[in-house]
Amino acid sequence: MVAAKSCVIPIWFHEYKSTQAATQVPPSNESTGQVSQQCPTNVTKSVSVQVNAMTNLSCFTHSIKDLIMTTWEILLRDKTPCIIAYREDKNETKETNCSGEGITWESRPEWNHTLRIGPVTIDNDGSYKCVFVTTAGNFQTVYHLSVLVPPAVTLSEEGDGTVVCKAVAGKPAAQIFWVPKGDCFTVNETHHNRTVTVKSTCTWKGFNESSATCFISHVTGSRNMSIEHQPHSSRELGVSLILGTMEFSILGGVLSFGECLKEDQWWQVTIH
């Protein structure tokens, strides 16, 4: 028989908890063995979901006999734990401190005990723990939910031949590199909501290529922005912005940084 493990019980279950020991009569050996083989007592999973999407967190995928109750404990940053509990004998579901979280039962809890979250916001980042209490013991599933935020990308000219490529408010931080190589530096700024703005600045000197491209790599997709220029005699520079999405492409880190134009070239930035 699987030994019982501790779990979070809301206040409104106290009366029931006091009588639980008397009602926890183990099933037959065959039934207990079946539950033990199907259900690891502790399961931990990491889940990533893009902001504004919908997601379901399943508490348990196998049918459970002799269910006593189910609880979801939701731990979000800087918030009081939210507890959603279902009591089998009364077919009753109650919530504590869960208002405004965008979290509901996906269907009747006695069917699959799945949480439906969405549209997902960055505030849904956190830990979600489900505990099944049965006569055979307690079974726990923990999800560590990470919300992904695609960055906004910009390309601008700052004067004196300096170009800035930004990936604004992404989560996790984006990665920026330039082709061809050049004299650039990158700074990361972390915001209060844990998004990160990545800024790559290039001062172009001795640039002999016809264009330079800023590549932005992020787990939600990759983009690139290209700068095309004409020789110094024309004193004109065209900038084209190419936004191509490569789904869930990770380019593997900052490979190289910027390239440069001749110091005395003039900049005229146009975004197409």
Image (cartoon, grey):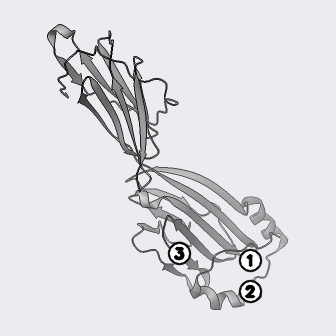
- For the residues labelled 2 and 1, say whether their Cβ atoms are less than 8 Å apart: yes
Q: In which quarter of the image is residue 42?
A: bottom right
Instruction: Report which residue position mark 1 lands on.
Output: 135
Viewer-closest of 155 and 28: 155
Secondary structure beneath dot 3 equals strand
Q: In this view, does 242 lie above or below 68?
A: above
Disc 2 crowd rating (10 Å Cα; few below 14, some 14-19, many 20+) is few
Going from the N terminus, do you reach mark 2 or mark 3 first?
Answer: 2
Instruction: Report which residue position mark 3 lands on.
Output: 84
Q: In this view, does 102 lie to the left or right of 250?
A: left
Calculate the distance from the C-alpha at mark 1 to the C-alpha at mark 3: 20 Å
Q: In this view, does 235 lie to the left or right of 160?
A: left
Identified at 50% across, 64% down, the residue is: 77
Viewer-closest of 95 and 93: 95
Q: In this view, does 210 lie above or below 241?
A: above
Residue 239: x percent and y percent? 23, 23
Identified at 42% across, 37% down, the residue is: 187
Q: Is residue 184 left or right of residue 267?
A: right
Q: Is residue 217 visible?
A: no
Image quadrant containing the C terminus: top left
Disc count in the image?
Answer: 3
**Kind of residue at badge 1:** Thr
Secondary structure beneath dot 2 equals helix
Residue 165: x percent and y percent? 33, 32
The image's mark for residue 23 is 2
Identified at 40% across, 19% down, the residue is: 182
Calculate the distance from the C-alpha at mark 2 to the C-alpha at mark 3: 22 Å
